[in-house]
Image (tube, rainbow, N blue to C red):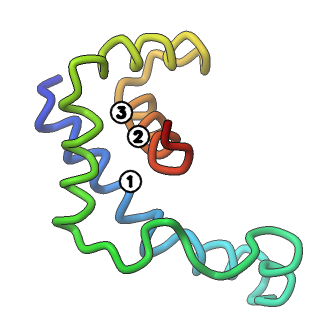
Amino acid sequence: MKIELRKLNVLEYLQFERDERIPELIESYDGDVEYVINEIWGPLTTVLDGKTDNDLMDIINSIMDKDTYEDEFNAFKLHIGSDDIEEIDCWLVWEMICNPL
């Protein structure tokens, strides 16, 4: 799979995290916003709030264009035990955003 397609898949995942994650959580708990805040998520924000699609692409490029990305990808692949390239890319980029070195 070409890296540009992989990046677009990650963009779609990050857009979901930014735009749909919290509303989906609230819906899955029957609209109980207080429960989601107090027991599940905390403040109804994500690390991606306020980021545009261009900002997200810049983040993706800064991570996936690094010379070390393929090594990090392979290590993460072993760690999670998956062969799904899209899943690994999405989870790895998300982890790098949430837990930068």
Which quadrant of the structure image shows residue 50? bottom left
- Disc 2, disc 1: CB below 8 Å? yes
Residue pictured at 30% horizontal, 56% vertical: 12
Residue 33 spot, x, y in % from top left = 76, 89
Residue pictured at 54% horizontal, 70% vertical: 46
Which quadrant of the structure image shows residue 79? top right
Residue pictured at 32% horizontal, 73% vertical: 51
The amino acid type, in three-letter code, at marker 3 is Glu
The amino acid type, in three-letter code, at marker 2 is Val
25 left or right of 89 in image: right
On screen, 8 above or below 73? below
The amino acid type, in three-letter code, at marker 1 is Tyr
Residue tagged by mark 2?
93
55 left or right of 2 in image: right
Q: Earlier in the sequence, mark 2 or mark 3?
A: 3
Q: Disc 2 and disc 3: Cα gap in Å?
A: 11 Å
* Classed neighbour count for the residue bearing mark 1: other residues with Cα under 10 Å, few (<14), some (14–19), many (≥20): many
Residue 75 spot, x, y in % from top left = 49, 12
Q: Disc 1 and disc 3: Cα gap in Å?
A: 10 Å
Residue 22 spot, x, y in % from top left = 60, 75
Q: Earlier in the sequence, mark 1 or mark 3?
A: 1
Residue tagged by mark 3?
86
30 left or right of 63 in image: right
Residue tagged by mark 1?
13
Residue pictured at 22% horizontal, 35% vertical: 6
At numbered mark 3, what does the secondary structure look like: helix, strand or loop? helix
Residue 67 spot, x, y in % from top left = 21, 19
Q: Nearer the viewer, residue 50 or 19?
A: 50
Which quadrant of the structure image shows residue 15? bottom left
Q: Earlier in the sequence, mark 2 or mark 1?
A: 1
